[in-house]
Amino acid sequence: MIKNTYTLNVLADYFAYRRRVGHTTAMMEGAKKTDCVILVQNENDIKHFKKLKPDGDFRTLTSLNDKLRGEIKPVVIDNSAMCDILSYAVSRIDFLESQVAELTEAKKSRNSTN
């Protein structure tokens, strides 16, 4: 279990700063051999990846919503989409942790004045 955002930050940084090392190639090689959902960052990525797997079942982060509900295929995530997912998760966790800290401090202040 991840205890803090450090691990998520390490992964986000790795995917963000290790471009052109073969993430997409490895992902697409596996996807070509499998009936899977391929999660990409945006519509432009779909156009690009359709050249590599014309019959691919592509989904974007913005169009995903409930489209995986009931799905029974494996999901393959492109590194650009993974960067977005991890970055968003880290920012939300940081925001929520700051909210908890503020509320905790406000509660302490309120209790000390009573």
Image: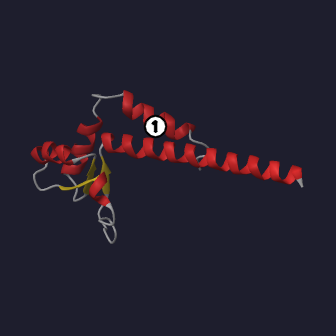
- Which residue lies most toward the bottom here? 70
Q: Position of residue 40 (x, y in %)?
A: 26, 48
Report the front residue among 94 and 75: 94
The three-letter code of the residue at mark 1 reads Leu
Indicate left or right for 111 with 21 as reference.
right
Q: Residue at x 31, y 40 (%)?
A: 80
Looking at the picture, does residue 27 appear above or below residue 66? above
Looking at the picture, does residue 71 appear above or below residue 89? below
Q: Position of residue 111 (x, y in %)?
A: 85, 54
What residue is disc 1 on?
11
Tell me the SS state at disc 1. Answer: helix
Q: Position of residue 9 (x, y in %)?
A: 50, 36
Q: Position of residue 93 (x, y in %)?
A: 55, 47
Indicate left or right for 11 with 38 as reference.
right
Q: Residue at x 16, y 55 (%)?
A: 56
The answer to which image quadrant residue 62 occupies is bottom left
At label 1, counting other C-alpha atoms closer than 10 Å, the crowd grade (few under 14, some 14-19, many 20 or more) is some
The answer to which image quadrant residue 58 occupies is bottom left
Q: Residue at x 29, y 63 (%)?
A: 73
Indicate left or right for 90 with 32 as reference.
right
